[in-house]
Structure formats: structure tokens, C-alpha cells
Amino acid sequence: MAIDVESIRKEFPFFETAPDGSRPPVYLDSAATTQKPAVVLDALNHYYIRTNANVHRGVYRLAVQATELYEGARSTIAAFVRAPRAEEIVFTKNATEAVNLLANSFIWADGRLRVGPGDEIVLTEMEHHSNLIPWRLLAERVGATVRYLGITDDGRLDLSDLNEKINERTKVVAVVHASNILGTVNPVATIAARAHEVGALMVVDAAQSVPHLGIDVTALGADFVTFSGHKMCGPTGIGALWGRYELLEALPPFLGGGEMIENVTVDAMHYAAPPLKFEAGTPPVAQAVGLGAACDFLNRIGMDAIAAHDQALIEYALDRLGDVPGIRFIGPTGTANRLPLLSFVVDGIPLQRMRASLDEAGIAVRSGNHCAQLACSRFGVPAAIRASFYLYNSPDEVEVLAETLETATRSRTAVTADTSFDVGQVRPYKDILLPSIFQPWAEHLVEALAPAPGTKALDIGTGPGTVARVLARAVGPTGAVVGTDLNPAMLALAVESPSVDGAPIQYVECGATPLHVSDEAFDLITMQQVLQFVPDRGAALAEMRRAARPGARIAIATWQPLHRNPLFRALYDAVATVLGPDRADLFEEPWSLPGIEVATLAKEAGFVDVELREWTLPATVPGEPDAICCLFDFSAVSPYIGSRRADLTAAVRANLAHCTDGTGVHSETAVTLVTARA
């Protein structure tokens, strides 16, 4: 039976036109969370208004009704995933909590359920962080080893070494049933069979598959299955762990408190039987009732009909979006064994520009690494756009997405450096300060980094284009360089420069609030004198971490304080004398970011091997001291100079008289350099 999308959408209040006439967005983010039908919202309201009482604890009529609703929802959900017993469903906050419950319980379990030193845990490179980090934490805490099943070039699990990866040392195999970033539906039963051959436990993350495929937990061959309510038209704050009853009986509880205890004395305690043993405290009663209503709603439509609708949508989407120039899908390009979601990048268009274009067009999609950084790294992209579809989406919405993407690709020039800026005012900066100050620093920096030929490099803060151009020569024609800057006029100066021998350079404006870098993955990232102008420095370092390949190097240069930079101190003192100390404080900003703060931010962003060093280089500015006054045009005091420019110039001349001769102004500049590795 085919799905009538228009009729289904009428059951979701989200899709109604608001009283002010506004329409909801084209919602293509159901892999993150689904919209809620009215029957689910009604079930929540009815519980809170008519049957709100705590469960299992009271014998009065209202409490009994609440308990019946709660346990009835458990039975409904158990039937939805074909669990043999309702008692095998443990309610949790979400799938993430369900995995954490298991991972922590395995630390204290006995016998075959216990994970300890020398044991191995097998994961895959396409895991969501919710089925990755808990196992990594478990391994760190007990001294176990984590191994990974890889991903093939076409986005499928690589099972060529399955028997080697899953061996007699394996205690747990945790595999995602369907990838939230690739859309791949994995052959869980095959993996489970191998796990059971060696006596390992099989854990399946089914958060993405349960809403679409109508799974049978026993047919999967799993020992434990986790899923979330909010991805299947249910409320947030509710998920479930299914486990074979005998295993749930053998596991120790994760949380202690009320409800999970059968009886307790001063020197003994006995746990309640599953599932209550794992549901300490007041449970999410209303959310469970809402999830039960969601299961009834999906059953009424029919999971086979939903799966067929999903298949038709993904077939159409792959075909239609495949016509978008430059689009590159991350994951399988075939339609077999995959969910109705697509992750992609568009070559030549920064992701932040593309996602902004989609948002402006009223299209809700997710962008980022989708909590699947290992998969992103496998395909060499730090981030991607993901469009995910569900029973309330139609081919017309796929068409809207495709047309918006095509419009964006027709205006590619808008996402690179704009060369229309009048750079006459800033040209002295390029002609005077670049060759005397920034070029020597660029040469020194790149020489110290010694990038290998073929390196793919990102330079944040081109100055303008100085480091990017030196990098281009260093990495050679087989490499690539992206140069960015906060200032579009700087980029205009960089773009107009003659090309250099070596790698091609693409110049892209990166902005500052927040900082957005290119959406490619880089082997080397440099940043010079930019971080102090970014309001959220922690986010900027996180953005750099996102763009760094595993093992990539970063180098961040910031000016040392003014007392270490006499050339700039002369300018500062001139501003203080002529415009006053308040204006001088504004001028001080580029020299006010301590290197130790940058190093700390790098560590917090996840970089390792963080080192901090100080460098000083001599600086000679040809001509009179007047030449370096062009720096005022790039400082915070420019709006306040007015008629005082001559006074400022005279003050600078006086401050630098002691180091000026017939060949120019002789001084030095000093920076702090933080290097690290991703």
C-alpha cells in the first residue's frame, strides 16, 4: 500500500500553516529527530492532564492507571521490535544512555559478561559517537583493546578481515545497524554469527533503522539492541535497551536507587527483576506513553509501506541530486540496503555557504560531522551536508533541494574572494609592511614547518596571501593551498597578485563570528595574527580541529606583548599621546593574546603534542617612519583619527628617531608560536 504523503502531513501539527501565514521549512533532518504526530502529542497531554501519577508505587486508582499506561507502552514497544518478552525492554533516556548502561555494567559483571584487561572490543569506523565513545571509555578504564571494521570505498562495511578482527579475545562487538551519515544498512546477522562463534556479545545500535525498517531484534542475531524514541515520531527523553532476558538477569545494575531494589537491609540487598533493575528512580512515564503511541501510529501506516516509500524517495533523490554540478555523495551511490538519507559536499563551494543558502531557502538540513568523525575521516571530509527523509517527505521536496543546490552552484564566484573591493586605501600595507615584516615571518614559519611536497594546506589569515603563497611554493604542484582572511579587502589584494610557482591557491573569506574555514580536510593548517580578532576563540580552534585530518599539524602565531615589539610599541605610544589612553587600549588588541591561552585552547579542542615557543626576527622598514603609519588604517583607531593624522605621524617619527637611518627604520618583531597535532 502506497503512502499518501499529503494525508499523513495533516496528522502532524508541525506542517500546518501558522496563524500569521508563515509556512514551516522543508524539513529534511529526520535522521536527527522526527516531527511528532498529533496522536503522540495527545497521548502526552492526556497522561499529564488525566492520569499523572507515579508508577509502581501507589495502589490508588490513578496510580494504577498510570502504571497500566506505562507498562502497556512497554508491551507495545516490545511488540514493535518483535521482542519475545515485554520485560526485555528497558526504558532509558535515549540510545546513548542505553549504550552507556551496557558499557558500565560490563565493568562490574561476572563471567562472560565482564570486560577486563586484555579483552577486545570490536567497533566499526561508521559508528555514531553514541556507540563509539562509551566503548572507548570502557576500554580505557579496564585496559581492553578496541579494534575496528573498516569501510570500503563505496561506503559499505569491509568484512574481508571479519574472522581476524573478531577472534577468541573479543568480548563485545558493537555495530550500527544503519549509518546515520552514510545511510548504509549493515549485514548485522552475518557479524553476529561470527561474534557468537567466538563467544562474544553482539550489541546493535538501531537508532536509525527502527524508524524505517521495522526490525526483529531476534532475527538480527543480537544480544542487545538500542534505539531512541525521538527518531521514530516519539517524544524526546525516551529510548530503549532490548536485551535477551537471561543476559539482563545476569548483568548488575548501572544506577542505584528507588524502584530497582527488591528489598534492602543494613547488610544486604536484592535487586528487582529486569527490566526494573535498570530503571532506578521515577521513570520517563509520559515519554514512554508517547513512544507507545508513536509505535501504534507507525503500525497503523505500516512499516512495509514506510520502507517502500523510503526506498522510492532515496532512489529519486540519488538520481535527481546526482545532476547537481560538483556534488559528491559520502556513502553508497546505490539504493540497495540503505536508508533514505544522503550526505554530500559540493566541490568548490564551502559548506558554510551552502548550508546558509539552503537555510535562506527554507530548507532544514544538518551539516557537520554528524557525530561520526571516523567516517568523515575515512572519506577525507571534515564535514558534510545531510538530507534525511521520512514518511512525511515527498519528491517535490527533493526537487526543491536539488533546485536550490543548482542555483548555488551557478553562482560559485560568490563563495570565493570578492575582488571588487577598492583596495587603494590599504595598498600601502601591502607595499610597505608585507615585504618588510610579514614576508620574513612567512618564510621563517614555513621553513620551520617544512611541509612535504603534495601537502594540502590551509592558511587562516593570509596577510594578504603571504603565508599562502610561501606554502604554495613549498608544497609544490602536487599540493594544494586554501588561503582565507577575515578582511575581504585583504583577500582582494591577495587574489590580484601574480600566481606563484607551486600549488594552486584558492582564496576564501572565512568571517570571524563565527570563524568558518574551508570544508575540506587538510594536512597542515596555519593561522597568523587572526585569533585575537575572533570573539569565540574556543569555537575557532574547534573549527580548525574539524578541518584537520588525523595527524595533521597546526601552527598558530600571535604577536607577543608590545614590550617585546618595539616597532609596534612606538605606534601604540603615539596613539596614547595624540588620541588618549582609551584609544591606545583599542590599538593594543592585536598584541594582547597570550600564547599560553592559545596553547590551552588547542588542548581543549583535542589537539595533542602542543608546544609553545617564542620567536623574534629583525625588521627593517624602508623609508622614513611615516611609512609604517599605514598600519593605522588597519587598526581599531582609524575612525578616531580625523584631523589628527599629521600629529600621529609626527609622534611616530619622534618615537622611532633613535632607530632610523638613511636605509629605513630598524627594529624587531616577536611572536609566540603554538604548534600541535590533530
Image: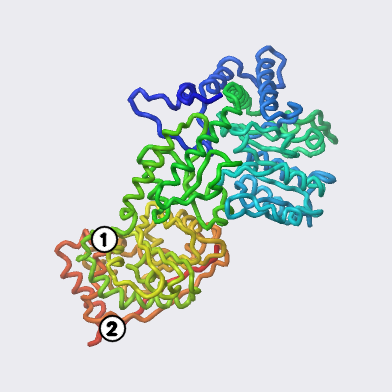
Looking at numbered disc 2 in the image, what kind of residue is underneath it?
Cys
Which amino acid, by three-letter code, is at mark 1? Thr
Q: Which residue is mark 2?
A: 659
Q: Percent position (x, y) of residue 482? A: 40, 63
Q: Quadrant of the C terminus?
A: bottom right
In the rendered view, would you say 366 is above or below 421?
above
Q: For mark 2, does the 10 Å Cα neighbourhood hold few (<14), some (14 to 19), or many (20 or more) residues?
A: few
Say which element carries label 2: helix
Q: How many marks?
A: 2
Instruction: Let me know if residue 286 appears in the view.
Output: no
- Residue 101: x and y in percent read 70, 40
Location of residue 354 in the rendering, given as x and y in whole percent from the top left corner:
39, 48
On residue 211, the disc is none
**Residue placed at 14% from the left, 63% from the top?**
643
Considering depth in this image, is 86 or 585 the residue closer to the camera?
86
**From the viewer's perspective, is 124 left or right of 318?**
right
How many other residues sit within 10 Å of disc 1, few (<14), some (14-19) or many (≥20)?
A: some
Q: Residue at x 34, y 59 (%)?
A: 486
Q: Are marks 2 and 1 in contact (CB under 8 Å)?
A: no
Element type at mark 1: loop
Q: Residue at the far bottom: name it.
A: 662
Q: Is residue 481 left or right of residue 227?
A: left
Q: Residue at x 50, y 55 (%)?
A: 382
Q: Residue at x 62, y 45 (%)?
A: 130
Q: From what the image shows, is residue 397 above or below residue 616?
A: above
Give the residue at mark 1.
Answer: 419
What's the distance in space between the residues labelled 2 and 1, CA to CA? 38 Å
- Indicate the quadrant where residue 518 lies: bottom left
Provide residue 262's location: percent of width, then percent of height: 80, 28
Inspect this view and state whether residue 443 appears.
Answer: yes
